[in-house]
Amino acid sequence: MMMRPCPPRQRGIALPVILIMLTVMLIGSIYLLRASTSTTLTVTNLAYDAALSKEADLGVHTAFDWLSQPATKPLLVANSAANGYVATMNSTWTVSTPAFWAGSVVINPVGGGSPVEYVIHRLCNFSGTYNATTPVANSCMLSAAKQGVAAPTALGSSLSQNAPVYDGQPQLHYVITARIFGPRGGNVVVQSVVMMGP
């Protein structure tokens, strides 16, 4: 009887290599899933902040509408709490200081949404007229029109050749600040600087 030789023992390395490759692919897919989830959350948060910024613009527009009314001009020398107007601005205040928001007004959007709070500050040290000298001299942030920068004639001036040239009135600076607290804990602060004549 003839004995058949035993086949040689197989020493395949394919199985361990495939198991390592499957493990690497599994870990890679987990990281890919986490990265796509993180990206989705980031994009969602950015869209949420953009929507809150647009809602906060309602406060800036409402404040500007009140500020630009001709009937409002005489009221700008003193605080007007009903309109969210403060005739002074302390240089130490920031938007996180509670005193900054003293005298603010809260409005509710017509179609729903989060309430918007806004306040208007005139960049002056004291209330009263911008050029007052008694009882103390008022100091305000002013800008004078510069001739020949944007156009040969100042905005609103006559284009006639023989028109007299008068010095323009200074422009007072007003800062409109609006903030909104969103339903998911987000908040947005929007500021705008407006220059108007006294």
Image (cartoon, rainbow, N blue to C red):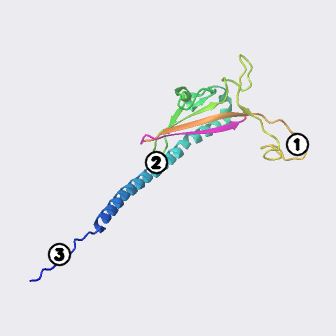
> In this picture, which residue range is highlighted in magenta?
184-196
Residue 77 visible in the current orientation: yes
Rendered view: 11 above or below 57:
below
Of marks 3 and 1, which one's residue comes earlier in the chain? 3
Q: Secondary structure at mark 3?
A: loop
Q: According to the image, label 2 marks what residue?
A: 45
The residue located at (58%, 40%) in the rendering is: 60
- Pinpoint residue 187: horizontal percent, then vertical percent: 48, 39
Q: According to the image, label 3 marks what residue?
A: 6
Disc 2 vs disc 1: which is toward the camera? 2
Query: Which of 149 and 76 lies nearest the eye of the viewer?
Result: 149
Q: Report the quarter where the C terminus lies.
A: top right
Q: According to the image, label 1 marks what residue?
A: 163
Q: Would residue 129 be found to the left or right of residue 53 on screen? A: right
Label drawn at residue 18 = none
- Where residue 95 sits, quadrant-wise, is top right
Q: Would residue 113 be found to the left or right of residue 86 on screen? A: left
- Where residue 166 sits, quadrant-wise, is top right
